[in-house]
Structures are given as C-alpha cells and as structure tokens.
Image (cartoon, coloured by chain):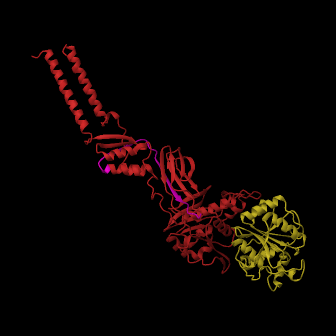
Amino acid sequence: MPSRADIRRGAEWALRLALVAMLALSLWRATHEGAPGPVTRTTRASDLTPALAAATRTDRIGALEVEMDAFPAPAQRAWLVALRRAGVEVRWRGAVPVMAVAAERVREPRAAVRMLLTSGAGAAYVLSDSAGALDSLMVPAAGATLEAADVVGPVRARQGAYLSSVVAPEATPRREVLVLGRASWESRFVSSALSEAGWRVRARIPTAPGVAVTDPAMLPLDTARYDVVVALDSTAADLGSAIVRFIATGGGLVAVGSATTMGALRSLVPARAGTRRPGRILLDTDSMSRSDLPLRPLEGLSLDALVLERRPGAVAVAVRRAGLGRVLAVGYDESWRWRMLGGVGGPADHRRWWSHAVGLVAPERDVQPSMVGSGDAAPVAVLVGALGPASLARSPALEVGQRTLPLALLILIVAALLAETASRRFRGAR
Amino acid sequence: MTDFVFATAQYESGDWDSAPMVPANIIDTIARYTSIDVAPTGVIVGLSSPAMFRYPLLYLTGHLPVRFTEAERTNLRAFAERGGLLFVDDHNHDIDGTFHKTATEELARVYGPLRPIPNTHPLYRTFFTFEDGPPTTSHELNGWGDNLVHKTLSGVERSGRLALVYSSKDYSSEWNYHPDNKRFLSVDNTKFAVNLVVYALTR
C-alpha cells in the first residue's frame, strides 16, 4: 500500500505532466495562429468596418456578433450578408428604434415633397436633406407628415445615432385640368384658384343654349392631355360617357354638388350630394371659413368610399377608386364665398384646398416608388430582412473566444506550478 | 347654387344712385340672352361693408366728386386681390368733369395706374362680338359731355384678369331707362352689359 509521501510524489508528477501538456498546448496554439476555430468576435455597428475586414481576411472568426448602436450602412450590411453566405455566423443585438421614412411628390404643379415618418410615439427626430436641416419634431403615435417645397438629395430622419433615409422621386410636369360648370361664381373662382396654383386649366362654361365660353381644342377628353376633370354641376352631363372612359383609363374626377347625381357618373362617384344645408349667415364679417359654407351633405356612400372630410352630422368630401382612376365627391358647391369672404387668407386657403382636391385624384403615373434606390427607408425591416431577427442577449461568460482560452490556460499553468512547487517545499524537497 | 345678383356700389361721397334703372335693364338683358341664373332684383351694397365681398361684380357710377373713405379703399384693394371686378362708369361723359377727375384719381390710388383696354380684349368677344371695342353711346354721338367718342375703356388687371373696368362713355345714361321701353329700341343697347357679366363669371 503506497504511503502518503508516495501519493504526494505521484500527485507532483501528475502536476508536472499536466504542466508540460498545457505548455505544449500553448506552444501549439502559438505556432498555429491561423488555424480555423469557432471564434466569436463582438463589435459595435458604429465601428463595424475593422471587424468586417478582420472577418474577411481570416477564417479564424467563425461568428460575428454586432451590437447595433447605429444602423450599418448599406455597404456594411451587404458585407455582413456576404460573410454570412461565406459561412460566418452573423448575429446582431440591441434595442434599435423602429422607424421608417417615405417621401413622395405631391401631385400638384408645385410638386412639393411630402415626407411621411413613422416611429414609436414620442420619439424625437431631426429631418434633413443634403442642404441642411428641414425640421425637427416629436412623432405622434399615428406618425407625422411634413411638406417641403423641394429637397436636395436624400431625405434623412435621424434619432440619435440611428438614421433612416429615402430618395424623393423627381418632379414631373402635370397635365391639364378641365373645368366644366355653368356660368357662375363657383366656376369662375375654382378655375382661378387652380390657375393660380399652377394648374393649366381649360374650361367649358355654357352661357346660353348652344353657346359656351370654351377654351380651344378642349376635346378629346383623354389621359394624354388631362390629369383631372372637375365637374362643378350637371352641365357636364353631355360628356358623361367620355368622363367614364377617362376615369377607366386612369384619369381623375372631382364631382361637385349636382354633378354627383348625374346618371352617367352614378357608378363612379363615392357618394351623391343630398339636400342643401345653409351656411352660417355672416352679414358683417369677413372671416368665413370652410365650415361656414353651405353644404350638400354626401349621402349613399359606396362601400369602398373613403371619407376625407366631415362636418357635424354630415360628410363633406369622399373619395374612391374607380377603374384605374379616382373620383372625389365634394359637397361644397359655393366655395367661392370662402375665397371672397374668408379674410386676408381666404384666397390662399381656397386655392390650396382646390389644388389639393385635384391633386388627390390626379394620376400618379409619374411618381416613382420612394423606396427605389434607397435601402434605408425602413432600416429595421431591411436589417431583419438581411440578417434575421435580433439574437437574445448572451452572457459574456458563455463566450469562448481567442482571448479567453489562453488566459484560462495561463491560470491553470500558474496554479499547477504553484501547487507542485508548494508540495515539494512543504515536504522538504528541493 | 345661388343666382347671379347684380350689385350697385354705394359710396359715401357723391351720388352713387344716379342711374337707378340700370340694374333692372341689365338683369332683363341677362335673362333675355343668356342661361345665367340671375336674381330678379339687384342689390345695393356699401363699399365700406364686408357685404360687398358677396358680390364679385360691382357697378359704380355718379356725377359728383368721388372721395373714398379709408375703409372703402381697404375693401376695394381686398376686393381686387380676391378676384372681384369693379365696373365704373362716368355718368357725366366728361373727362373734364369732377366725377372723372376724382374717380380716376381715387381708383389709381387703390388699383394703380389705369391703362387702355385693347379693343381685341376677350371682354369684347366673350358673348357678343364688338369688333370695334366698346360700343358707342347716344350721348357720345350727340356730342354731349366732353363731345368725344371714346375709343377704348380703361382698366387694371390682376393675375391676368380685369379687376377694374373704367368707362367714360356714359353707359349709365345709355342704360338708364325703364325696362318696358326697351321694346322700342331697334338695337338693344345693353348687350355690352352681357359681356361684362359673362366675362366676370367665366374668366
């Protein structure tokens, strides 16, 4: 039976052997630096390029974990995807803000850029283009919409280090608008408002049986010449079938008051104008607003009608798609009073409202999708699409990387050396 | 929709009501020749009242000196900016008369300088065609007033549309007769008023 001293000596030998083995392993690791292995490298998105370069140059990095403190640039994102396809496991984590920005040209002659921003409620954003800041805002739950006369380069929405960007489509000239109505102040001032807003307006205004004030070359009525027809009353009835064809091929129609009740247009309009409700009597004031106008409330809304404006107990404006075109029904048939009696801002308000109404139904054939050419309009969606969902947060203790293994080996070597030396010293040996 | 209402402008100085039969004759003419829905009676509206903005075509005449109040000037400026058309006629038919001198001075303060309206203007072709520009009046042909036949009207445009038409031809006398007497005329002398109304409603 071995004595305690034999056992102790045996343990010392075992420690010596272990030391030699661990030193051999360290030597092997030192001489085999380029050997493949399941090494995970952790980096931040704000400092991603060196890690990408390292992961590309050496095959020792088997996994790359990215802390998303910012969104990677499109090139970096493509690089990550390429690494993944090359066999490197790419993971990402971090509480990134869900955000998306879109930009479209308003379908009006001025062709302003409308920016739509959606994000978590209450998030603070700064919008800018290549020329500088456009605006800053807190995004409400329903998202935010802003308009700018024009933008230079891509539109960027920034929340801290997180950036979303989109390229606005190019502005293209609008086609003409045909106004059909009887000789009245409504015809006159709707035409004026649209002209002043930059629309090229042709009009046909009957003034007597068989006599009309008509712009030359009014017909044919087709989408090659016109964007929108504005029918202010039932005098458009003789062009009913032409208007139906025009809408079917992508044109827009604004039908006002009695124009919504014309038989030919019945299948197109989203609703029909009902019995007139008088406006507010404002004898001695110059402050009429749209809500003070007389109204023919829209009735019998079609199932696909979208209500755009309501008045107490009534629908004032509604829109629907018909064929390839769109049709807007308007219950205000005396909007000219708003322009004349709406105070200093009346003409501008009236002009803006009418231009917007016509723009709503104008064809969008020349509007390019804002996502084209820009992969960062919805960066989180793009990120998930490229790299998959975020990985769960992992404990650093579970990670085994190129730095942790040599350190553990060193600790084991030192501990074994100390134990073996102490054992020999305590038993009096050298 | 509401009918067209013929409105006569009332101003604080002068005799704004010097031609009281004109509205009835013009209303008769509009109803006779056009399909425009016209109110059977005209209205009188003060230039200092916001109510004037309810009538985008205003007729103004008189014999006596015209001095607008500040409120009248302010309203007329807004009226022009919003798209209203003011038709002013010198009931004296006299470019040396007090109405012409004072009215043109006041109008120039409000609208800027008056310029001749070319006789090719759409105003003369928008319903009836007047090849030679504004039709002459019997007062011109009879040598009354300034003893001149005025070849053109004057005016001011805003955004490519007439905002002011000024006449020295004395249409107020020409059109100021009882409507029942129109049947005795071989040629209806109020046809030019139709062009004024149609122009205002369509251009």
Q: Residue at x 21, y 32 (%)?
A: A24
Q: Residue at x 71, y 70 (%)?
A: B161
Would you say B132 lies left or right of A12 here? right
Q: Is residue A252 above or below residue A91?
A: below
Location of residue A153 in the rendering, given as x and y in whole percent from the top left corner: 52, 56
Q: Nearer the viewer, residue B5 or A37?
A: A37
Instruction: State left or right for residue A118 relative to residue A217.
Output: left
Give the farthest residue toward the top. A428
- The C terminus of chain B, quarter of image: bottom right
Q: Is residue A101 above or below residue B32?
A: above
Q: Residue furthest bottom?
A: B186
Q: As rendered, which of A116 and A361 lies closer to the eye?
A: A116
Give the yellow chain's letter.
B
* Above or below for A79 versus B199: above
Query: Could you say which quadrant of the image residue B186 lies in?
Result: bottom right
Q: Is residue A321 visible?
A: yes
Indicate the position of residue B5 as horizontal and vertical percent values.
75, 69
Query: From which residue to which does the magenta span run?
Result: A84-109
**From the viewer's perspective, is A285 left or right of A177?**
right
- Shown in red, the chain is A
